[in-house]
Amino acid sequence: MAETSRDHLKRANIVFWGLFLFGAWIRSLDIWHPVDGRIREAWRECDYAAVARNFYREGMNILYPRIDWRGDGPGYTEMEFPLIPWAMAALYKIFGYHEIIGRVLIYAFSLLALLIFFSLARRLLPRWGAIAAGLVFIFNPMAVRVSNSLQPEGPMLFFLIAAVYAFLRWLENDRWTWYGTAVSATAAALLVKIPALHIGIFFALLLLADKGFQSLKSAKVWIFGILALLPGLLWYGHAHHLWLAYGNSLGVSNEYHWLGWDLVKNVPLFLKYLLRLAKREVMFVWMPLGWIAALAMIWYRRKDRTVRIGIYWLFALGFFYLLTIRTAADSWASYYHILTVPAAALLVGAGASFIRDCTGKDGPLAVSLGISAAFSLALISGKVFFGLTDNGFFFPVGLGLALSLAATAPLFRTRKSLRISGLAIALCFLSIFPFQALQACRDFYPRQFLGKYACARQFQPFIPSGSMILAAGSVSKDDTGRPVAFNAPYMFFWLDRKGFNIPSDALSIERVQEFIRRGGRFFVLEKEALKSNPGFIEDMKKHFALLAECQEAYLFGF
């Protein structure tokens, strides 16, 4: 029997190392390019790349990150702890300035996140449940999207999962090693990105469920909270001082994120925000039918410890998303929903365990998972190697689902009560993988900013080095009248110039002249910014010299 157990463990290890290599390949597909027009999150990536470049050129003091759209000031900015930009700059010092270095660094964190999630899934789920959870995590389009993007979500995800794993281990055996690891990983996650703060609610629910209310009297619990929060409190306090002193922020204090009575009392608008929030979750985490499978698992296996862990995690996330609904519901903030992926994957893994337990058979479930994963791989390969378009995906998605369900159907012959509901759950469950692959494929090889990048290359010879520019950003208010972070960094980064941002809903000759008096000498005016004020371009042509025009923008000189 001991030999048999070792054989099972050996085979499971082989399977998970295979899954790891598979996930590593998918995450490497879009890594080998600099910060040019082939990016998904132009605002976030160009800001991070600029902060790293400014560390490299202007000094390595990690306490004072600098942005390019600094106006006539030093550029110190409020942001999360700049671990990644600073590490990029340190590597520039060693290997030279190569923008690809940042992507490789983020990619390394994504591989660590894969490993630690596999460890978490294998600890909480039976073998086939852990494999299914691992496949969800591998294929998830948001996890793939941030796996080599210059933004903090990838490292935050690693530290977040590591904190959960260590915290659960500490609850089980009360070892100081796991206690210290959980504290350190939680503190690191909060430093890297403040949305990780929801983990405090999750941990509190776990404590109350496992230890009861008497756990709140424990000094060790209070020390945990203090040690985990203290580094973040110190950093964000310092960062907020930079905002107050210099007026620059990467979306922390210069945007209103919060749910408020003004939104709640406007029922149609509030429902609109809720629908946006649900759309972000469905399209980037659960997939069109996956949420049905998750609800079924919560109902059928609500007493299962792993399902309860998933429920507690989702409750904490739901509270956070609702509290920050003005941001979390926005289309540009889709990557905020990376936080849901580990909990969702665990619940899907519990669904696979449910299917297995209903029948007591491994074979059909293994075949179904294999077929579904194989078709998902085929979709990604079709995109990568053959350039298959979205329209070409529908037939293989449908065929993959049909074959997967056909392989699953024998599972339910022995239980009439589960014949229909079980097949429905299996269909929803198995649909997750190909739809994830489809969504991930749509994100590969982005090109939406190539036009703007080409404009920057065209305009650069007209702008002498050291000249300050003015660039149009987005709107400064949301549809409830609250402030929005309008600063657009990409033209500054691509042109390698410093200067000012002007919101697109505040375009006027008077505002432009204010920036001229402060040292602005050129204006990169994107045509998209003229939608709310189409007559502004004629006013500009009357007052200032049009130096160049491209498909996306105008360049004026003062």
Image (cartoon, rainbow, N blue to C red):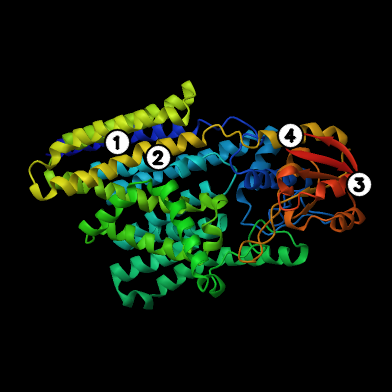
Image position, residue 449 (x, y; %): 65, 37
Q: Which residue is mark 2?
A: 436
Q: Which residue is mark 1?
A: 13
Instruction: Quadrant for residue 308, please give it.
Output: bottom left
Please give the label number shown on residue 542. 3
Q: Earlier in the sequence, mark 2 or mark 4?
A: 2
The image position of residue 180, as x and y in percent, is: 44, 60
**Which residue type carries mark 4?**
Gln
Q: CA distance from mark 2 to mark 3?
A: 51 Å
Q: Which mark is residue 551?
A: 4
Q: Pointers 1 and 2 in contact (CB under 8 A)?
A: no
C-alpha gap between disc 1 and disc 2: 25 Å
Q: Closer to the observer: label 2 or label 3?
A: 3
| Residue 67 seen in render | yes
Q: Nearer the viewer, mark 1 or mark 2?
A: 2
Q: Tell me which numbered mark, 1 or 2, is placed earlier along the sequence.
A: 1
Quadrant in the rendering for residue 303? bottom left
Label 2 secondary element: helix
